[in-house]
Image (spheres, rainbow, N blue to C red):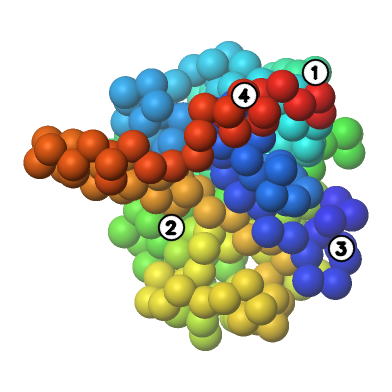
Amino acid sequence: MALHAREGGLVMPNAWDGVSALILADAGFEAIGTSSAALAATLGRIDGRHSVTGEEHLDHAHLLGRLTGLPVNGDFEDGYGETPGDVAATVDSAVTRGLAGIGIEDTTGNPDGPIRDFDDAVSRVRSAVTAAKRRIVITARTDNFIQGRPDLDDTIRRLTAFAEVGADVLYAPFPPDLESLVAIVAAVAPTPINVLISPADQVLTVTELQKAGVKRISLGPALYTHAMGALEQAAKALLAGDTATATTGISFDRLSELLAREP
């Protein structure tokens, strides 16, 4: 929690494999996160539908931490369980595997009813906090905005309730605008707020987000999709016969150097 409490907070980019985690660590970031969306994509699966198991995600997060020696926050969807007790078991497993933080969403994995009822969502966060026993940072998240529920009042109600049951960090991806973000920050203060890149209507700088009171900035799958965009362009170049453009990037020696480093 010390990184959240300091002036300016932290930027916590999300890795998707060993080399991406090592690159982020080598760049100087002090903590990294997993991305459930990026992890699912690397496995050829769709995010948010319980397509990745809790054990798979725990193994993945443990790998990133072991390679880098950095604190790792696990983007663990709904906590990988139907009941609050299941969420508690996931939190306990995350502690055992050495994670520094874990995110619990109010999602269901069901596209026909993607957001859990208020009481259920709060109960699951409470269970996570109880299991954590301050051994791991609990980030409680509501996905209202990204699930077609643009209800700022309900979002604040949920986040406030999560804080009241002991969540360490709060998170509502893609509020519609800066005004809404500032309202969220003010409503839940002093509990730190995580922002996924920026509000939905514009991409702000780190400094601008810090001025709004944000304490943690994460990128979700954005770095992964950036890398896949470069791959797509390289594939098109190669198909057109341009091997030079298709083979730019870091060298194999650089990969070997990163993989040989001790955390």
Q: Nearer the viewer, residue 158 or 136?
A: 136
Q: Residue 137's image quarter? A: top right
Q: Which residue is mark 2?
A: 144
In the rendered image of this protein, does residue 157 appear above or below residue 52? below
Please state, as top left, top right, bottom left or bottom right, where the C terminus lies in the image: top right
Q: Position of residue 68 (x, y in %)?
A: 74, 31
Q: Residue lying at the far left in this picture: please name it.
A: 240
Marks 3/2: CA distance? 26 Å
In the rendered image of this protein, does residue 208 appear above or below residue 197? below
Sequence order check, earlier mark of 3 and 4: 3
Sequence order check, earlier mark of 1 and 2: 1
Which residue type carries mark 2? Asn
Task: Identify the residue at horizontal 71%, vertical 43% (top origin).
Answer: 26
Q: Residue 42's image quarter? A: top left
Marks 1/2: CA distance? 31 Å
Q: Which residue is mark 1?
A: 96
In the rendered image of this protein, does residue 229 appear above or below residue 128? below
Label 3 vs label 2, nearer the camera: 3
Which residue type carries mark 3? Ala
Q: Which residue is mark 4?
A: 256
Which residue type carries mark 4? Ser
Q: Secondary structure at mark 1?
A: helix
Q: Which residue is mark 3?
A: 5
